[in-house]
Amino acid sequence: MGIVDLKVAVLGAGAIAGQHFDAIRRTEGFVACAVADIQLERAQAIADNYGIQAYRDYQELIRQERPDVVVIALPHFLHRETAIFAAEHGCHLMLEKPMALSVAECDEIMAAATKADIRILVGHTQHYISENIQAKRMIESGEIGEVVMINDVRHLNYFQDTRPQWFLEKDKSGGGILANLGTHSIDKIQWLMESQVRKVSAKVSHHGKRGNVEGSGVIYLELESGLPATIAQSGYLGATRNETEIIGTAGMLKLVTGVSLWMSRGGAYEQVDVPPMDTPFELQYKDLLSAIASKNETSCPPVYARSVIEALEAVYRAAESGVEQFL
Ligand SMILES: NC(=O)c1ccc[n+]([C@@H]2O[C@H](COP(=O)([O-])OP(=O)(O)OC[C@H]3O[C@@H](n4cnc5c(N)ncnc54)[C@H](O)[C@@H]3O)[C@@H](O)[C@H]2O)c1
């Protein structure tokens, strides 16, 4: 540990915590100091591995350890409460996506962050995945001409037995597959095109074997730029798929996020070479570190992450009312 290392504490020792700890270990300038989980044995297992302190109570952790940075890797309904508590104690935040349950909650977090003058990076990982970055570069350089539409498709078994129950309870998660994974798609489309959602229609369906959240849905959206896009997601048994097709006047890109990138300018898709990069989580930590050092915003600040929640709220309003929603 160097003298300038910032102390990082992680709240939540669940599925995603390991990727945060790996990235913290690999990022010069940060050092892990503690982990909290109400299931103390989970926190203890990580603490033993990293030689750090485990806590059951996140508030006690923040008071005792006084971390410089707090990572919020908790169920969605806890993002607001923990982000505000950490901000009030002067901690910068690595806040997992989706930012919070509602736009109103996002606004409360942003007010606390402004008051405390802390930096926040919301973990919209899509911005940091090498295939996505390469696709964005190719769109911007005009390799497929003018983009005329994006179609995003995702299928996976969302109701697998190992999924924690809170994901399937709307008051804790904010919604089902569209809140958890649809927000990745909304974010990916907005970020690739640097334009935010302005209009939404949607239909959702509930066929999950547990919980009260939607298990599938189709979204039609338009960006401020006028670009149309569709997002289709289903969480039932079937073939897993995670593909985004970006269709231009001079060609098409097929993005298999985290796996590969393909281009066609007539004829079959051919694989595009993607330069190797640091892992998405390492890039997120580097981004947060430079924002803290420069006192500038991160490249995924709360004001942006709020726009994803605003679009998600419009999706659910459109699905409930059957009426197109404008943002
Ligand atoms: N960026 C990505 O690609 C990505 C991937 C997976 C998850 N996530 C996000 O990360 C967050 C966590 O997801 P996960 O899959 O790790 O969930 P998880 O359920 O596996 O882990 C959450 C942990 O929080 C603990 N917890 C619950 N209440 C607590 C409290 N009051 N105090 C302390 N600990 C408490 C639980 O015991 C559990 O261990 C979510 O926001 C999720 O959407 C992001």
Image (spheres, rainbow, N blue to C red):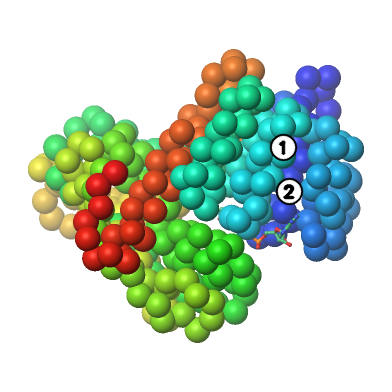
* Lateral position of residue 130 relative to residue 278, left or right: left
Q: Does the beta carbon of the residue at mark 1 sit less than 8 Å from ligand 1?
A: no
The residue wearing badge 1 is 86
| Residue closer to the observer: 86 or 300 | 86
Q: Amino acid at mark 1?
A: Ala
Q: Secondary structure beneath disc 1?
A: helix
Q: Amino acid at mark 2?
A: Leu
Q: Does the beta carbon of the residue at mark 2 sit less than 8 Å from ligand 1?
A: yes
Give the distance between the C-alpha atoms of the residues marked 1 and 2, in whole angstroms.
10 Å
Q: Where, quadrant-wise, is the C terminus in this rendering?
A: top left
Residue 118 location in percent, x, y? 64, 26
Q: Residue at x 19, y 33 (%)?
A: 142
Q: Looking at the picture, does residue 263 appear above or below residue 180?
A: above
Q: Where, quadrant-wise, is the N terminus in this rendering?
A: top right
Dot placed on the residue nearer the N-terminal end, 1 or 2? 2
> Disc 1, disc 2: CB below 8 Å?
yes
Q: Quadrant of residue 91?
A: top right
**Can residue 126 be seen here?**
no
Instruction: Point out the quarter of the image occupied by ligand 1.
Output: bottom right
Label 2 CA crowd tier, 10 Å (few <14, some 14–19, many 20+): many
The residue wearing badge 2 is 11
* Lateral position of residue 91 relative to residue 268, left or right: right
| Residue closer to the observer: 266 or 248 | 248
Q: Looking at the picture, does residue 163 appear above or below residue 285?
A: below
Residue 87 location in percent, x, y? 68, 33
